Image (tube, rainbow, N blue to C red):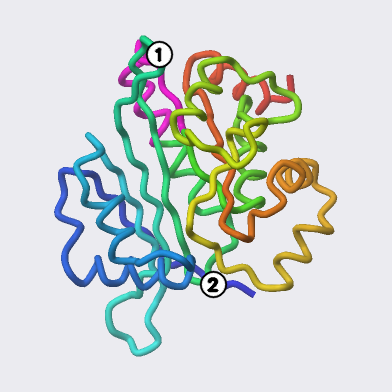
Amino acid sequence: MANDISHYRDFDHTQQWSDDATALALQAVMKQCFSGISPADYFRKYFLSDDYFKRALRIFYAPNESGTADTVVGYCLITFKKQRIGRKRVTLLGASAGFLPDYRSGNNTVPFSIRQALGYWARHPWETIYYADTMLSPAMYRVMAKNMATIYPHPDHTTPPAVIELWRQLNPKPENPQRPFVLKTGRYADYSKDDLKRFKTSEKPEIAFYLRENPNFFKGNAIITVIPINARQMLKMALQKIGL
């Protein structure tokens, strides 16, 4: 059974959250989440590089048994950058998240991710905004597909040309040109044998779709999941919420 997260703290790019102790705690979480990467390099790339004009971070904590300061047990980082798709300049949101093994239930990243995406859209409704996440987890794909009205790829949604072009930019040399959204990341989520068995025997349609399109997810292949953030998405989500 997963343990309880006691609280979280939110930071943005204007705040000094990256002190040495916090940086090391976040890298310790990454080390237990992924193989095939250097936590220090990963931290520098997503948390400290100049590639993004804005970042938002939520750090999750649990009580420390020794009675000292609470322990960092997870994080969710949302990044913001500008990207050109053809002649159009868009805002591209990305995500990085990880939790220690005992704290991985509860979909804790979803409210924060959606809040950041909708908050940015509310302040910049004239911009073209996409949330694009390289999802190594079938479970996370299912969570986002259930919470968002329109998501790509999806068996019930025809992918627009702009999203296909975005996939090609983010993944210029796909292993299978028919699936430009499947990206070999070089990092591996540390799944147990029970996790893999549960995914393969799942009857949930979103997980079945994910496995059909990306059967080698446990070897470091991710699906680049793209979600448009616009008024149509908001309206469809509202109608979906009230059952229309």
**Vertical position of residue 60 compared to residue 159: above or below:** below
Q: Could you tell me how many numbered marks the image carries?
A: 2
Residue 56 position, x and y percent, is 30, 44
Residue assigned mark 2:
101
**Vertical position of residue 188 compared to residue 140: above or below:** below
Residue 163 position, x and y percent, is 53, 22
Label 2: how many residues lie within 10 Å, few (<14), some (14-19) or many (20+)? some
Query: In which quadrant of the rendered image does the C terminus lie?
Result: top right
Of residues 210 and 177, the one nearer the viewer is 177
Query: In which quadrant of the rendered image does the N terminus lie?
Result: bottom right
Residue segment shown in magenta: 116-131
Quick check: 116 left or right of 133? left
Q: Residue at x 35, y 59 (%)?
A: 59
**Vertical position of residue 94 compared to residue 65: above or below:** above
Residue 124 — which label?
Answer: none
Of residues 79 and 148, the one nearer the viewer is 79
Q: Is residue 124 magenta?
A: yes
Residue assigned mark 1:
86
Q: Residue at x 25, y 37 (%)?
A: 52
Amino acid type of the residue that numbered disc 1 sits on in the rendered structure: Gly
Amino acid type of the residue that numbered disc 2 sits on in the rendered structure: Pro
